[in-house]
Image: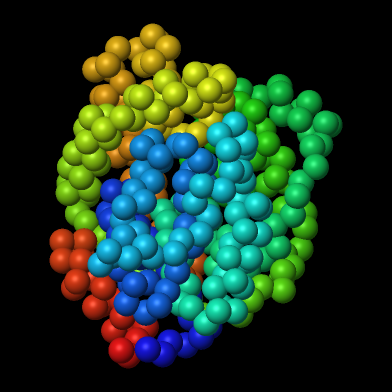
Amino acid sequence: MSLPNPNLLVVITGPTATGKTRLAACVAAKCEGEVISADSRQVYRGMDVGTGKDLHDFMVDDLLVPYHLVDIVDPGYEYNVFEFQQDFIKALKHIQKRRKQPVLCGGTGLYIEAALKGYALQKVEPDPELRQSLQLLTNEELSQLLAQYRPLHNTTDTTDRERLIRAIEIGVHQKNQAPQKTGYPAFKPIIFGIHFERKVIRQRITERLSRRLETGMLDEINRLLSSGLKPEQLKFYGLEYRILTQYVTGEISYDEMFTTLNTAIHQFAKRQMTWFRRMERNGLQINWIDGNLSIDEKVDQVLEKIGFLS
């Protein structure tokens, strides 16, 4: 087999519960590829069910498709987009050096853009004076201020006060810095998105939530708490961990937990689509694939578009 373009980067994205990982793995299996995860939570070891870390999706025809940036840090650590961009560059160079096909896959729009745009993200040191002034604002006022710097993507940005202030601090710094190229490895991205009608997405989300609760998601929360993580730390890791921790610690009932979490994930999927539409408006073309097609049909669409010849 030969690659259609050694510098090609296949990107597979879309909202939650659309089958991105499976499609990415099957595409990679067909063209001697390796998957780079662009998921802000699947980087954590031992946080599997709640993050939707379906590692069995990487098994294609009894062979494990190589993957990167999954299970790379321990729970309790606060991984960020700056670190992701650096890790993405390392993984991409490693794959390109061995002349394999890189396939970037994930639904975290911020991470996808950080990888594709290629501008330098910098470590931002704390600004005590700015933080002191921000402490005078309410959470709602902080959210409105953050929205001036970037689209609101992760709900923990707007529900956790410390993260709100930190995000604004980073936004202020980056606005005052001229973007610089990072010496990125050269690549040409072709972006694919998996699309379902909204009512189908909602159904898939609800079914997946029920399945995860039946297959150990609550056990995972209890195990993480038993390992020494505090409830406040788990709440940092997004919807599932925040709301399930509230249930486990007795703050809400099971029915309240399920209803609240189900609704929140539906809203999250809607925000993801808003992010992808903004990406398109900003010049990143997304080739949308009908999610109702069979996996073989989806794979064929991707391979045809990237010009892969077997």
Display colour scheme: rainbow
Q: Is residue 291 left or right of residue 175?
A: left
Quarter of the picture holding the C terminus: bottom left
Residue at 23% x, 70% y is 298
Residue at 75% x, 49% y is 123
Residue at 42% x, 61% y is 105
**Quarter location, residue 129:** top right
Q: Is residue 42 left or right of residue 206?
A: right
Residue at 35% x, 12% y is 252
Residue 217 position within the rendered picture, expressed as x and y whole percent measured from the top left:
34, 30
Residue 246 position within the rendered picture, expressed as x and y whole percent measured from the top left:
41, 17
Q: Is residue 196 left or right of residue 12?
A: left
**Quarter location, residue 219:** top left
Residue 53 position within the rendered picture, expressed as x and y whole percent measured from the top left:
38, 46
Task: Decide: is 6 above or below 233.
Answer: below
- Compare residues 261 and 250 and report the one nearer the observer: 250
Q: Is residue 53 left or right of residue 94?
A: left
- Compare residues 226 and 291 and report the one nearer the observer: 226
Residue found at the far front of this picture: 62
Residue found at the far top of this picture: 250
Task: Decide: is 127 above or below 231.
Answer: below
Residue 275 position within the rendered picture, expressed as x and y whole percent measured from the top left:
43, 54
- Compare residues 256 and 247 and report the one nearer the observer: 247
Quarter of the picture holding the N terminus: bottom left
**Quarter location, residue 292:** bottom left
Query: Is residue 23 in view from this perspective?
Result: no
